[in-house]
Amino acid sequence: MARKQTAGRDQLGDFAPKFAELNDDVLFGQVWSREKELSPRDRSFLTVTALITKGAFAQLPYHMQTARKNGITKEEIAEMITQLAFYVGWPNAWSAFNVAKKVWDD
């Protein structure tokens, strides 16, 4: 079972309490915990792909670290980004590789 998420409340609880609640309790509490339906590894693979596709690089380091913890290897992340480069753009791939290098080289 995944650990209890508190990032929403920690970072936005005072400013946007409802958003923080939805982030921590619904997204991470209810959706990410559905491990019978989809493994954390697969959820990480999908989430990282979606973030790269959208160019949401501010959230990418956290989710790449989570992906690594969930078992995605350096070789797999490199292959994923290479595949995505042709569908979502070369600049997005370059940006994603810069994040991935930091996460997997640590």
Image (spheres, helix red, strand yellow):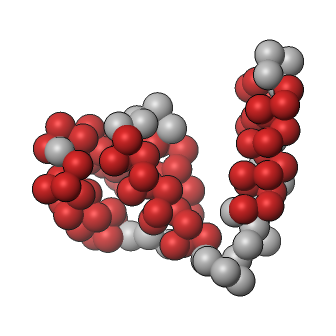
Q: Is residue 63 visible?
A: yes
Q: 28 and 71: which one is in front?
A: 28
* Residue 50, placed above or below residue 76: above
Position of residue 58 in the picture relative to residue 82 (left or right): right
Residue 36 percent coordinates (x, y):
71, 83
* Residue 18, placed above or below residue 6: above
Residue at x 39%, y 56% (from the top left corner): 49
Q: Quadrant of residue 91?
A: top left
Q: Looking at the rendering, in which quadrant would you find the N terminus?
A: bottom right
Q: Is residue 99 visible?
A: no
Report the residue that reaches farthest toward the bottom: 36
Residue at x 28%, y 64% (from the top left corner): 80
* Residue 35, placed above or below residue 85: below
Residue 92 percent coordinates (x, y):
24, 41
Tell me how many marks there are.
Answer: 0
Residue 58 percent coordinates (x, y):
46, 32
Position of residue 103 in the picture relative to residue 63 (left or right): left
Q: Quadrant of residue 29?
A: bottom right
Q: 64 and 38: which one is in front?
A: 38
Q: 93 and 73: which one is in front?
A: 93
Position of residue 74 in the picture relative to residue 29 (left or right): left
Residue at x 35%, y 37% (from the top left corner): 55
* Residue 63, placed above or below residue 75: above
